[in-house]
Image (cartoon, rainbow, N blue to C red):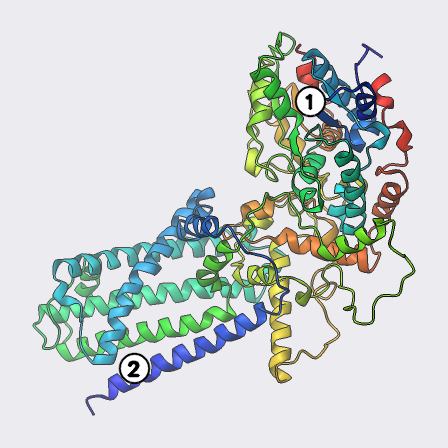
Amino acid sequence: MEYIPNILFALALIFGITFFTRNVKKLSRNIKLGKDVDVSGNTSQRWRNMARIALGQSKMVVRPIAGLMHIIVYVGFIIINIEVLEIIIDGLLGTHRIFAPLGTIYNVLIGSFEVLALLVIIAVVIFWIRRNIIRLKRFIKPEMEGWPKMDGNMILYIEMVLMLLFLTMNAADFQLQQLDAPHYTKAGAFPVSQFIAVLFQEASISSLIILERSAWWMHILGILAFLNYLYYSKHLHILLAFPNTFYGKLKPQGEFNNLKAVTDEVKLMMDPSADPYAAPPEDAPEPEKFGASDVMDLNWVQLMNAYTCTECGRCTSECPANQTGKKLSPRKIMMDTRDRLEEVGKNMDANKGEFVPDGKQLLDDYISREELWACTTCNACVQACPVSIDPLSIIVEMRRFLVMEQSAAPTELNNMMSNIENNGAPWPYNQMDRLNWVNE
Amino acid sequence: MSEELRVKTMEEHIAQGTQPEILFWVGSAGSYDDRAKKISRAFVKILNKANVEFGLLGPEESCTGDVAKRAGNEFLFQMQAMMNIEVLNGYEVKRIVTCDPHSFNTLKNEYPGLGGNYEVIHHTQYIKELIDNGRLSLEGQVYKEKRITFHDPCYLGRANSVYDAPREVLKNTNATIVEMKRHKKSALCCGAGGAQMFKEPEKGDMDINVLRTQDALETNPNIIATGCPYCNTMMTDGIKAHEKEDSVTVLDVAELIANSI
């Protein structure tokens, strides 16, 4: 009988981790639906970017208030997880505060966890106020209605509850230590929870133990549940921010990739010895589709971008089109890409791993042409993203599909392009007049 | 027509057996747009003053294809790029300067992958170089009492991290340089990029150039300086929308320098 808690704990742990692994596999499968893209080389630069942008949060502090509070929650999350390690060992072995023999170090650790927990609670409350009372503009855009809004609040509630459980557990433990309760080693420092413990002064040892155990169990089960909530939530960024910043764009922001398939065709066209009427060889691969109309046409980094997006809306608030009331929102581009990718993933799950065409695609069913044509390619969204997401590359890829596969550019742009074809300038002027300005 | 400009095409250079230091890529706007042509002229005035031996492609220059690429027409872009690369490589061009950040960006970043490898600089960088090397000296009297604010072109600033050269150059006008609230990395686009220059904007509450001009007007300037022919058009239109054309003018850095010589 005495091993029942250990067994239950081990089962909960196995269940939590198994389910999480299943989700990670699904995530990785979905990301791999994207096309291959060359990300070789520059490894040291990539590591530096990851260290600076993800680990060092360098782009978060561009907005100092949100940045500072985010760092508190982030540091709190990472450091308090050291405590989770102890909880897991205690849970499996049936010990209590197994790291207690560390003595002073242990006291400092527990003490700082408590201070961090309090700071996290404060930050989370402020975050909640920003979202729900102040209603910052970037949190109430149309794409945030419904689930995204609830998801954002849910994360804050979960974090708050986890921190409160952690402090309650410590408060009860502290009180039990004061009462010399057996099994409750005198260890740790409780700069915050000692004030909560005041509330329990009248409580008996047995009810304190029930309180401490309940808080302990709910805390760890809550963490396991949160871990499994990630896949369904924008909160996935806590994991994906790292690979995403690693694989982020290294080239100048203004540099767009040159499509290889196009290069081959153009070279052929410009080759005077090529026979323009020659039939393609029998074994020639099917000509590549230009641009993207669905998620499978994007590359895997772009798909990872979509899962990494935490919907903070910094991109959208910096977007000139969005600021002037156009429909385009770079955040929505990322959210749509993820939603469509999830839909494709579910389709595959339901059809033994094969995607069965569902008559839908990213273009038009999720992202409208009006949004795509409103972009000025100014890179403000790319610059603003704290985790190196590139919404612009998706917009351009979809424009490529519209123009090259569908000839569906706005009329004025078609005129501009035929001018370039005919006279080498976007305006209808004679190429021979290119030097007229000198003598005007 | 004010004063005689000394220009030579690459063809003339070859015929005369001279080797230019640099190629001036004029770009389509600089060649045909009435406002941008003045910028080309101002820049050549500077080049002449500094005795720079430069070449032009003239009728052999064609659109870089940049705007086609941003619009999604990769095919047209690469056609243009490869034609231009053939011409540029034929003349063994090593160094290119241009007044258009869009040409600058594509020549510098996107042409190498298609076989065009050149050192490409923006005219504000080149003017800075000329001043630093003592080849160009300025009187700097005309704008002494003026307030100038510089609008960062997206394809110069964010796209290629060139923020300091235009500002350094502007100091030589001895004007008071004031920064807009959003500048450098966080500068707002003028609204012309991504092929928007050639189409009507999508439905919204206001035009981007009007919003950006508002940023500029908040600094209470006499002059809005730009380094891009498209920004120039957009900001000039913005000034009109705000009915400030009597008190604020939009000038390219090259024009401000040419007038300060």
- The chain identifier of the residue carrying mark 2 reads A
Percent across and percent down for residue A191 are 19, 57
Task: Using the rendered view, name the quadrant where residue A89 is placed.
Answer: bottom left
Q: Which residue is mark 2?
A: A9
Q: In the figure, residue A32 lies in which quadrant? A: bottom right
User: How dense is the environment of label 1, judged by Cα within 10 Å: few (below 14), some, or many (20 and up)?
Assistant: some
Q: Position of residue A93 (x, y in %)?
A: 21, 80
Query: Which amino acid lies under the numbered mark 1 shown in the image of this protein?
Result: Glu
Disc 2 marks which amino acid? Phe
- Above or below — where is B214 with respect to A270? above
* Secondary structure under the numbered disc 1 in the rendered image: loop
Other-residue count near label 2 (Cα within 10 Å), few / some / many at <14 / 14–19 / ≥20: many
Q: Are marks 2 and 1 on the same chain?
A: no
Answer yes or no: is residue B6 visible.
yes
Q: Position of residue A255 (x, y in %)?
A: 64, 45
Judging from the image, mark 1 belongs to the subunit labelled B
Please report the residue visible at 50 percent of the width from the left and 53 percent of the height from the top: A387
Give the numbered dot on residue B21.
Answer: 1
Closer-to-camera residue (A337/A179): A337
* Left or right: B186 as drawn, with respect to B56: left
Figure quadrant of residue A94: bottom left
